[in-house]
Image: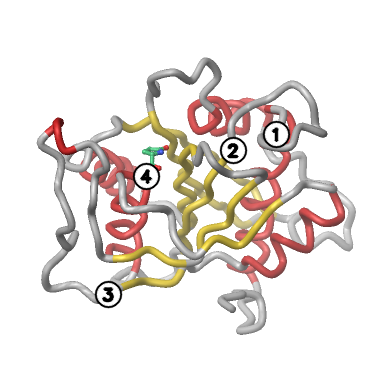
Amino acid sequence: MQQFSVVISGFDRYDGIDVNPSFEVPRALAEQGLGISTDIDNPLSDVSVTIHTVSLPISFTDSWPELKRMLDAVRPDIVIATGLKRSARGIALERCATNLMDAANPEDAAPRRTPIDPEGPAAYWTRLPLRSILRDFTVEDIPATLSSDAGTYVCNSLFYRLMHWNASQERVLSGFVSFPKVVESAHSPQGLPLDRQIAACRAVVREAIRYHLRPSSEEILLD
Ligand code: PCA
């Protein structure tokens, strides 16, 4: 049986948010597992998956070092970083991490319009198989969009540093998924119930493992 180690990161408390999906979803998934069918035709029936979760501070300086400590300790095959995008209607699959920090609030001594890594490339593409993830979402009726950027705040910085690290790793797949706000009704104009967000994250991990087992150039949808 093939062993897979998956790290799913989220963030600590947000001001004004009662139920924080990027805190709740990784923990729920670690508790509930992936629910992989043991059907012999299922390519995932022969894998054993361990999910590790970490909740990070919303900080330009501290979030990446904390995630990196976890990556060094666990040496995962797959890393899914997650965050909250308050404006998102459904799940936003982030395809691109850009080399830019720009905090909207200048009071907190946060960076204004500066590169994350002055020596680094302008952007990194995700390594996650977005095409097959979207296909799963359609089957499970989970509203989602492809997103071209995770903003210019801490989520994007973490995503960029993660992809920068991933560039020097063999056989590690990483990417970033933004959750919308948690709402009660599946038919709200904006946001999704927590159980739908957990189902979405489960599909992301499942497809990432499938792709890790059998990479194909078609599955990463960039345009
Ligand atoms: N959302 C903020 C910071 C962390 C998060 O989950 C952002 O969009 O950058």
Judging from the image, the colouring scheme is secondary structure
Image quarter of the N terminus: bottom right
Q: What amino acid is found at the position of numbered circle 2 in the picture?
A: Pro
Q: Mark 2 falls on what kind of element?
A: loop
Q: Furthest residue to the bottom? A: 217
Number of other residues with Cα within 10 Å of mark 3, as a class: few under 14, some 14 to 19, many 20 or more: some
Q: Mark 3 falls on what kind of element?
A: loop
Number of other residues with Cα within 10 Å of mark 1, as a class: few under 14, some 14 to 19, many 20 or more: many
Distance from the alpha carbon under mark 1 to that under mark 2: 6 Å
Residue 115 placement, left or right of 55: left
Q: Residue at x 55, y 65 (%)?
A: 128
For ligand 1, give the image quadrant: top left
Would you place residue 218 above or below residue 91 in this image? Answer: below
Q: Are marks 1 and 2 in contact (CB under 8 Å)?
A: yes
- Mark 3 or mark 4, which is nearer the start of the sequence? 4
Q: Are marks 3 and 2 in contact (CB under 8 Å)?
A: no
Q: Mark 1 falls on what kind of element?
A: loop
Q: What amino acid is found at the position of numbered circle 4 in the picture?
A: Val
Residue under numbered circle 3: 122
Residue 166 percent coordinates (x, y): 34, 65
Residue 47 percent coordinates (x, y): 67, 53
Residue under numbered circle 4: 74
Distance from the alpha carbon under mark 3 to that under mark 2: 26 Å
Residue 35 placement, left or right of 48: right
Q: Are marks 3 and 1 in contact (CB under 8 Å)?
A: no
Residue under numbered circle 2: 180
Q: What amino acid is found at the position of numbered circle 1 in the picture?
A: Leu
Q: Residue at x 26, y 65 (%)?
A: 99
Residue under numbered circle 1: 192
Residue 119 percent coordinates (x, y): 12, 73
